Structures are given as structure tokens and as C-alpha cells.
Image: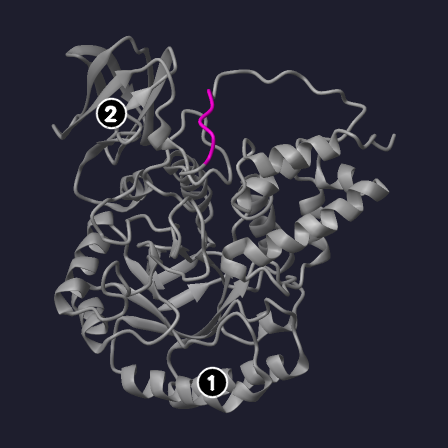
């Protein structure tokens, strides 16, 4: 194995970019009390996507699963549970955990690196934290002189941090376009890091967006927890990754939804919904098949949006994912024509009643879904407890002289009244964000500037507050009384 900072990952002398997913082992109804059959089902789902690598987060996984990775040829990023918050008195524990990880697993050929920590800088960087990582890095090289050392860094960590020069290879967990910023910010961040530090061997160790499969929208947007936005997010990221060979490894967060006791999002508490597959392993979300169109060798065709069956729009859009070079779409047996391309094929047609939509690729694979024209939005497509709205009703324009939830955070904080209001809102949101993990976070100057450019409505949605909720409407009414600074 060789990793080059500009050419990427090489296996036995040939280019072999790692395109994979992260895995948490728990599952619905069992927690971590899983058995071999569960592990073998996980492996089957992972392999069917076409992934060639796994990040096993954030702890040792079972010997049986490492053996499955050896057998199936998946390259593994292995790490210890040194995550999120640095504990000053935990150094010896981290060294013991690393010693056990390496000693117990050194003979698994699937493992290519030992990871020192994950997002450990959430509450800042101290001299002791840096020294702890140096000791971990040295220990890995003493125990195993062949494998790389690695580290998964929080996307808010400054790229000038001395931590980045400690391990052999680095990863960043980036969530622009989900927690903060726009999708374009992923590209800006990665290209800037590569340009300023061409010596760094860079991976994306986490990226993703939450989606509950019940939530559907013809107008998906950041923070709405819809399956459609998750698919849009990953469509952008997959294209970004494919055009950057120096990104030697990329890992979707996560292959499966997983338990997270502090979270209360999408009307489905206790879960992180970033998985490409549901917690019970029964439903593969649209984004799963999007990645299959990039990674999978066996031909297939898949129509996205199948769970958005009841549609209110007059003209609807259908996206087809396939690893074929040509796809044909038919509605009720009438062909809409063939399209050549790759990965994502988009068709539009007028929807008038009940329709059977069928896609076929040149290899002969076929997929069909049913759609229905309805007069009003289906309430089951909304987060439980939120207001059902008509997506296509245009709201009356607001007086530009006054603030609103559509004003940027920077515009609001430019006023004294707005700044005080946001202090309370920010405190509440940070405590709720990501199951409370936002509390105590150290925000970099670059991240703070990015937040100031964001409309408040987007930030509120990301905090789990619908723009149509009573709480947000009350907040908007308060802002409408505050005159903008000119």
C-alpha cells in the first residue's frame, strides 16, 4: 500500500482510490448485542453498494467482522474510542486502548491504518492534547512499523493546526451543506487545504446529511431531513470526489442509521439518520443507490423518489440512478425517450392521475414505481407535529426595511436588539444541535464568518425547527419589529 498526496491510494502498484462508508455495529431492537448473522447481513449490504473500504468507527469491532473484511477484500480504517472531548486524565487509557487494538489485530491484512482519534478538538486544542497524540503516534509505529497512522479531524479545526502534521495521513469530517454553509463550501475547503498543504495526504473521513425515509418533498432543502435532500447532497459530493484523485479515501457517514440517545430529530428520537440504510437494515435510501451508480460493477437501474408517491405538482421530475451509459423511461407504457450519460438520468412529465413509471437500461435491467397525482400535500410526508403546508404557495414579500428569519445571521447581529435575541437562540440551538454535542464547541473564525452569511431560517431548520412552526413564527414576528442597519 502506498498513499501519495497528489496521485492518491495505490494497492500493489496500481491506483485504487478508497471509496467507502463508515459503520456503527448497533441495530434497531438489539443495540450492540448483535450476532454473526447480523454482521454478515451488514457485509452483504456494504458489498452490494460496491464500496471497497470501511471506516470502523469509533472502537474495536468483533474479530468475526475483521475476518469478513479480510475474506471479502475490504480495506479497513481501524480506530480507538478517543473521541469528541479530550480528558486530561485519560492519556494512559488511550495508550492502553491503542496497544490492545494493534496487538489484537496486527495480523488482519484488511487493516491499512491505525487511527489515533476522532473529532477530539470539539472543545479546543491544548498542549496536553497534542502531546497525547504524539505518544499515540509513536506507540503505533513501535508496535507496527508498516501501517500508516491516521486521524479524523473535526471540520472546524484550523488547517494550520500542528495536529495535522502528527499522523502519516489525515482525514477531515466535513459537513458543509448540512450543519453549516452551502454545498459549494465543501469544494472550497478541500481545494484550499490541498493547495496550501500539498504535502498532506487527505481523505474525507466523514460527510453526510440526515434523512428519515418518511419525510418527502418536491422541493428538498438543507435541514429538512427529507430523503430527497440527502440524495441531492450526496449527488454533489459524489461528483466532487470523482474529480479529485488526490482524495485517496472517502467515507460516507454512515452506512446505517444508528442509535444516538441525545438526538431528537425528524420526529424520530434516539437516532442519527445519516445512514444510507435504515437502522433496521430493511430500507436502502435513494442515496445508497446513487453511490452504487459510481461504485458497483454489476449493472442495475433504480428510480429515486419512490417513497414520494403522492405528488401535488403539475409537472414532476423523476431521477434514475444507474451504472449504465443509457437509460429509457416510460410512463404507463409510453416511452419518454432514452438518455445517455452516467450515474443520474433526469426526466420530467405532466402528472395527471395514477401512473406506472418504468426505467430500463441498455443491459436490460428494469425498475418500476407507482405515482399518484393528489390535490393536497400528504401529511405523512411531514415531520410529525409540524404544519402541513403547500410547497408551491408563494409567500408575500416582506418589507426589506425590517429583519425576518430570512435575514442572514450577520444582518440580525448588526443590530443591538437582534444580537441579544440571537444570543438566546444560539444558546438553545447549540445545546440541541447533534444531540447536545454543540454545547461548549470552539468555533473557528472562518466558521463564524460562514455562519454570518447564512439565512437564519436555514440555521433554525438545521436545529430541528420548521419554518412553519409556532415557535419560529413567533421569532419572525419579533424580528419584523427590528429595523435593519443601513
For the stretch drawn in magenta, the main secondary structure is loop
Q: Secondary structure at mark 2?
A: strand
On the question of residue 182 being in view, the answer is: no
Which disc, if any, is residue 326?
A: 2
Q: Earlier in the sequence, mark 1 or mark 2?
A: 1
Residue 220 percent location from the top left of the image: 45, 31
Measure the C-alpha gap from mark 1 to mark 2.
52 Å
Q: How is the image coloured?
A: one colour
- Please name the residue shown 46% across and 72% down the image: 150
Q: Secondary structure at mark 1?
A: helix
- Please name the residue shown 16% across and 42% down the image: 298
- Region of the chain picked out in magenta, as a range: 386-390
Say which of 86 and 131 sits in front.
86
Name the residue tied to disc 1: 94
Residue 467 percent location from the top left of the image: 56, 33
Residue 199 percent location from the top left of the image: 57, 64
Say which of 364 and 474 sits in front.
474
Quarter of the image for residue 352 reads top left
Amino acid at each position: 500500500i502506498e498513499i501519495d498526496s497528489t496521485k492518491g491510494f495505490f494497492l500493489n502498484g496500481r491506483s485504487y482510490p478508497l471509496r467507502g462508508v463508515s459503520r456503527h455495529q448497533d441495530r434497531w431492537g438489539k443495540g450492540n448485542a448483535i450476532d454473526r448473522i447480523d454482521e454478515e447481513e451488514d457485509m452483504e449490504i456494504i458489498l452490494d453498494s460496491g464500496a471497497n473500504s470501511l471506516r470502523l468507527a469509533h472502537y474495536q469491532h468483533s474479530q468475526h467482522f475483521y475476518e469478513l473484511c479480510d475474506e471479502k477484500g475490504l480495506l479497513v480504517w481501524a480506530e480507538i474510542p478517543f473521541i469528541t472531548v479530550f480528558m486530561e486524565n485519560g492519556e494512559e487509557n488511550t495508550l492502553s486502548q491503542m496497544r490492545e487494538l494493534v496487538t489484537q489485530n496486527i495480523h488482519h491484512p484488511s487493516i491499512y491504518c491505525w487511527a489515533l482519534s476522532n473529532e477530539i478538538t470539539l472543545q479546543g486544542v491544548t498542549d496536553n492534547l497534542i502531546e497525547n497524540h504524539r505518544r499515540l503516534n509513536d506507540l503505533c509505529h513501535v508496535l507496527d512499523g508498516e501501517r500508516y497512522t491516521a486521524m479524523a479531524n473535526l471540520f472546524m479545526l484550523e488547517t494550520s493546526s500542528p495536529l495535522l502534521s502528527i499522523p502519516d495521513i489525515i482525514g477531515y469530517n466535513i459537513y458543509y451543506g448540512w450543519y453549516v454553509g452551502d454545498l459549494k463550501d465543501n469544494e472550497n475547503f478541500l481545494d484550499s487545504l490541498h493547495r496550501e498543504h500539498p504535502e498532506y495526504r487527505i481523505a474525507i473521513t466523514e460527510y453526510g446529511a440526515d434523512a428519515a425515509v418518511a419525510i418527502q418533498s418536491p422541493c428538498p432543502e438543507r435541514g429538512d431531513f427529507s430523503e430527497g435532500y440527502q440524495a441531492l447532497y450526496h449527488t454533489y459530493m459524489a461528483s466532487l470526489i470523482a474529480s479529485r484523485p488526490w482524495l485517496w479515501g472517502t467515507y460516507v457517514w454512515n452506512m446505517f442509521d444508528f442509535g444516538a440517545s441525545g438526538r431528537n430529530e425528524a420526529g424520530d428520537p434516539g437516532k442519527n439518520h445519516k445512514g444510507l440504510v435504515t437502522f433496521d437494515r430493511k430500507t436502502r435510501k435513494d442515496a445508497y443507490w446513487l453511490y452504487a451508480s459510481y461504485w458497483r460493477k454489476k449493472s442495475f437501474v433504480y428510480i429515486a423518489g419512490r417513497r414520494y408517491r403522492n405528488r401535488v405538482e403539475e409537472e414532476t421530475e423523476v431521477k434514475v440512478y444507474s451504472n449504465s451509459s443509457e437509460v429509457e423511461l416510460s410512463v404507463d407504457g409510453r416511452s419518454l425517450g432514452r438518455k445517455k450519460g452516467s450515474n443520474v438520468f433526469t426526466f420530467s412529465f405532466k402528472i395527471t392521475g395514477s401512473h406506472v413509471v418504468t426505467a430500463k437500461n441498455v443491459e436490460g435491467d428494469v425498475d418500476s414505481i407507482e405515482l399518484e397525482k393528489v390535490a393536497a400535500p400528504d401529511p405523512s410526508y411531514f415531520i410529525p407535529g409540524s404544519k402541513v403546508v403547500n410547497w408551491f404557495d408563494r409567500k408575500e414579500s416582506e418589507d426589506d426595511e425590517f429583519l425576518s428569519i430570512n435575514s442572514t445571521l450577520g444582518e440580525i447581529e448588526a443590530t443591538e436588539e437582534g444580537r441579544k435575541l440571537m444570543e438566546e437562540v444560539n444558546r438553545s440551538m447549540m445545546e440541541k444541535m447533534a444531540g447536545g454535542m454543540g454545547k461548549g464547541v470552539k468555533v473557528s473564525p472562518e466558521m463564524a464568518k460562514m455562519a454570518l452569511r447564512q439565512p437564519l431560517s436555514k440555521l433554525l431548520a438545521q436545529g430541528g425547527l420548521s419554518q412553519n412552526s409556532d415557535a419560529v413564527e413567533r421569532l419572525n414576528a419579533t424580528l419584523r419589529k427590528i429595523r435593519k442597519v443601513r
